[in-house]
Amino acid sequence: MVRMNTYSPVRVGIAGATGYSGVELLRHLAKHPGVDVRLAMGSSASEGKRIKSLARIWDAPIEQLDVDRLATETDAVFLALHDTMAAEIGPALAARGRRVFDLSGAFRLRSKDARTKWYPKTPDVEVPVTYGLTERYREALAGSGAGSLVACAGCYPTAALLSLTPLVAAGLLQPGVIIDAKSGVSGAGKSPTERTHFSEIHGSMAAYGVFAHRHAAEIEQELCMDVTFVPHLVPLDRGILETIYARLQPGVDAEAIGRALSDAYANSPFVRLTGSDLPEIKHVAHTNFCDIGWRVNQPGGQLVMVACIDNLVKGAAGQAIQNFNVAYGFDETAGLL
Amino acid sequence: MVRMNTYSPVRVGIAGATGYSGVELLRHLAKHPGVDVRLAMGSSASEGKRIKSLARIWDAPIEQLDVDRLATETDAVFLALHDTMAAEIGPALAARGRRVFDLSGAFRLRSKDARTKWYPKTPDVEVPVTYGLTERYREALAGSGAGSLVACAGCYPTAALLSLTPLVAAGLLQPGVIIDAKSGVSGAGKSPTERTHFSEIHGSMAAYGVFAHRHAAEIEQELCMDVTFVPHLVPLDRGILETIYARLQPGVDAEAIGRALSDAYANSPFVRLTGSDLPEIKHVAHTNFCDIGWRVNQPGGQLVMVACIDNLVKGAAGQAIQNFNVAYGFDETAGLL
Amino acid sequence: MVRMNTYSPVRVGIAGATGYSGVELLRHLAKHPGVDVRLAMGSSASEGKRIKSLARIWDAPIEQLDVDRLATETDAVFLALHDTMAAEIGPALAARGRRVFDLSGAFRLRSKDARTKWYPKTPDVEVPVTYGLTERYREALAGSGAGSLVACAGCYPTAALLSLTPLVAAGLLQPGVIIDAKSGVSGAGKSPTERTHFSEIHGSMAAYGVFAHRHAAEIEQELCMDVTFVPHLVPLDRGILETIYARLQPGVDAEAIGRALSDAYANSPFVRLTGSDLPEIKHVAHTNFCDIGWRVNQPGGQLVMVACIDNLVKGAAGQAIQNFNVAYGFDETAGLL
Amino acid sequence: MVRMNTYSPVRVGIAGATGYSGVELLRHLAKHPGVDVRLAMGSSASEGKRIKSLARIWDAPIEQLDVDRLATETDAVFLALHDTMAAEIGPALAARGRRVFDLSGAFRLRSKDARTKWYPKTPDVEVPVTYGLTERYREALAGSGAGSLVACAGCYPTAALLSLTPLVAAGLLQPGVIIDAKSGVSGAGKSPTERTHFSEIHGSMAAYGVFAHRHAAEIEQELCMDVTFVPHLVPLDRGILETIYARLQPGVDAEAIGRALSDAYANSPFVRLTGSDLPEIKHVAHTNFCDIGWRVNQPGGQLVMVACIDNLVKGAAGQAIQNFNVAYGFDETAGLL
């Protein structure tokens, strides 16, 4: 069922509207046919400022973060905040009946142990939480209602899980999956740090967080399988490319991989299967698409998959809106094409 | 006179060894045949750390800044510090007999009014100060002695002045010179700020400091002429390209420009005149060269000059060492080729 | 008058659909509410290929260029071809009654002498030609009809002319305008050359075409004034930033500049005036906006303006569609926001 | 034995002096204390040209390629040519008594089958061939004489083999090694192609040559072990980073890895072991260093190694000179620091 245009628009608030994901939320929601953006809030430092790149698209000044106003003046709230702040605000808003779409990692891990390790500020919550990887949780998202919280999937996990979950579900892979992930710098957030200084990254490249990145826990939760996950920072702004290595079960070939993926994404407007023609970041930049390609070395059954997304769109703001669309019964692509 | 190798090496200290210019100083001085780097000092935060990119070139840990040790354990000190810190330390070291080569702007402006405006923390000093644009002040540098201070020229002024001073001196230009300057991001220093965040610069470009950059005062001091100076930040790490616009006096042509420059730089190993073949940043990156090209539109007498340097070498560390070489009677290119 | 949605859509053809501007045309026209893209044609080499980045947006294979089919199966044709090919095809299509929107430079110059010099393959044509800088030629565009040719403005001229024409028209400037232009590499086209090799541009920057760029002739034609125009290639993909230098007439100040610009663009949805807050390329990338800022140094009356556009959108495909919108009576922003 | 300075310098020729590796050869050999560069030759197109970036370093014009002159006027020849041309010229020069240092892949593979597949133009040769990975073949290089050919190791294999050979030799790894390699664009050579166009790479990233790159054969030859090798092109100019995945044999830990590497490279001036502090490209750019770091996930025994080199120096020109130094008895670092 697709929501009718005759409905009154959904009143939406954005908390964290000045960060990289927040600006993308505003850019897309401002033109969403079923949305009325009522509140765009940032930190006190950004209060009263306008977002220059959005002039003529969203001209209102940024307001100071105010949970009470979000709870009373909106129907749905997008949180584009640091984990600790989302951990505090998200449950409060849901408890007051808002539908919360949280872009942070605070509520993604279901195991209390894992949460304690990676997101120690996240409280135990009473409200229902849905993991927001749209293509894998459409039914749960469609069934979520007022007072629920959608923990939108992380950027690295989105590309990894869209590639791997259909294959794992079909039992096509041997254990020992390796994910070599490369991300643009916007994934590190807007706060200036030594690592995000232009001169440290231009002409360079480095691995980081080896054996210690919380997105590994998120991937393993959804795959129910251990993985080796090594992220790298590459000298570009937007985009993730993941090269995934796995051994196939005996008898599995490239065609079987293709069938499993085609079946899984037959009705998914944002997953594009490129077959043996491997994807590139520039084909997905500034879009909500996830492009997935694969090759198999036979005999030996070595699978190499490559998946690409824009970390700020399908890896953050775009997927949050896609989740919102499914939750509210809009066309899944509304505001996103 | 070129200093003999039989002399004992000059004992050198570096204050600010962990910044971008400081690392370049270390890299070059470590292989300088007449130098013994005794002290490489940084802020307290960097104490004990090693500079990874210099492993096998300079392996000693960075020490904490200590003016007393610099004054007693070295002959010459290079200051690669913020202006305010250089303003404090430089005169103290010179007063104790060290030769100080200051890469900051603290002591470049001779007019007290200009200094008060652009470098308010700079004290009046008794010690002799030489403006360190090597090619224009070789005699003064050669005559400077113990207890003197060399205020090494700024990065933007170096390219502008090497291009313009011979032409202004020969009376070839009309008033109204315009300098459109483009700099890589390392020129903004190593401290992470919103402006130096990779994602703010990648795929972008902007002017800054229009009518309000202190390097304009430095250029005007040396040219004795008003200029319009507009710097821009471009998405690259190292290098400055300046496009300079001027009207020629009647009768002056491209050949006359070439003659004035050739005469001025006949004995300058680091100035390369490229004629009508305009220079590019990549030809000077990681070198101490300043490349200068020019074209003239006749009739009309519109001159367009293009000058390129590496802002960290000829625009900072390299020129400081070149000044040091002249001051100590080494070959001007020692440690720099 | 804004065209009604009840009209049947305009049948559109694109010649040169695989170049950088051609892909942008397809991307935008595919979602234009009043357009039915009937033909997307390329060179024979691209026949049958699909444009990977447009999968799910435009999935049809590229067809081989066929003037006859363009003339019979479409109402309007966008030409995103090299000048020489556009010079041949454009008049033929117009003569057969198509409305032609030419993105090349072939028909921009009105003076036969200038055309002979810069576009020697351009024939004399009988069909009416409109210069397609939307904001300056809206009436002529709205009055153009079947069998006419719109010579869409060049990328560099678009930024320069939107900045300067209101000021020149109001008599605010002295002669001697200088335009220091910086362009991303997509402006050089898709054909691989030594100059567009990644390694020649990354970490570098250079001026080119000094006193010999045909866009200077285009700017001078529209301003009725000589200018000094120096383009540079900068290490980014999309975007132009122009820094414009002019002396103001006595008594003119920054406010007068602002008034002239505000008056000129009061009803222009794609010109954003940023005042003394100078624009940056990243704020206009992937949009059809032209951002213009300015500062004045008083006394002296030195004006510095900065204008930014995306060379592939407002500098090419976007402006062509904007011209199409005005010519057909659509809302000027249709397909462009 | 280190060669004395009293020897007369080695007369050297360079064939292919205008490509990216060729320019690096010239840059380094021009300052090599034991070398007299007699001939710098390129294709006919480059004849008479000078290399702008080497002005004041190497000012002679490039001569046209002339095998006869190389054979009669030099002692040693560096070949920085395409594989097919090196396959033809290399043996001819060696047969005439020159020592040939070939930077191409033509002679790297010992198996005739592998050669036929990957380098079909390579003839069977009578002259002795040494594989030029300096750190692994020092004795063979030192024993090579007049009329021999050194097949300098490829860029990707250099980083992979320096990391893996000590571990494989010590039996520390299980089968199933994966090498995820990321290279800057200069590795694709100077010829402009669609793949090396700036706009195709800026802001993007892609895998290429999956299961079909001849460097995999070279790595497997030296390791005597199958590997999965996936190269990627990243948006930077110079540098390779390889992330290597392997399972350790039972009982092997990070310390054992460290010991094997330390033992192997105790006397290797250009291998820097960084331990658990993983290397970055910028620390090796413009140097002949190979930096290697590693981490182990216990239990499970998953090894992740990261190795970085500059593809044009340690991966090409620098290693060729290092091989030359060992072959002639110079200090291994001559001309390279």
Image (spheres, coloured by chain):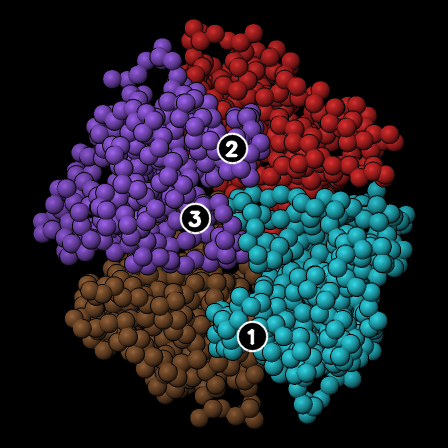
Chain colours: A cyan, B purple, C brown, D red
Q: Residue under mark 3: which chain is it in? A: B
Query: Does A23 sit above or below residue D277?
Result: below
Q: Nearer the viewer, mark 2 or mark 3?
A: 2
Distance from label 1 to label 3 (Cα)? 31 Å
Q: Which mark is residue B64?
A: 2
Q: Which residue is mark 1?
A: A63
Cα–Cα gap, marks 1 and 2: 44 Å
Depth check, front residue: B137 or B279: B137
Please state the horizontal and vertical placement of residue C150, each as a whole percent of the image.
38, 77
Amino acid on which disc 1 is placed? Glu
**Any mark on residue B188, and which?**
3
In the depicted structure, whether residue B274 falls above or below residue D60: below
Q: Of the residues shown, which amino acid type is indicated by label 3?
A: Ala
Q: Give, as a three-letter code, the residue at label 2.
A: Gln
Q: Chain of mark 1?
A: A
Under circle 1, the secondary element is strand
Q: Is residue C109 left or right of residue A329?
A: left
**Crowding near pointer 1: few (<14 within 10 Å), some, many (20+)?**
many
Q: Nearer the viewer, mark 1 or mark 3?
A: 1
Helix, strand or loop at mark 3: helix
Query: Does label 3 lie on the same chain as label 1?
Result: no
Separation of residues labelled 2 and 3 (CA atoms): 23 Å
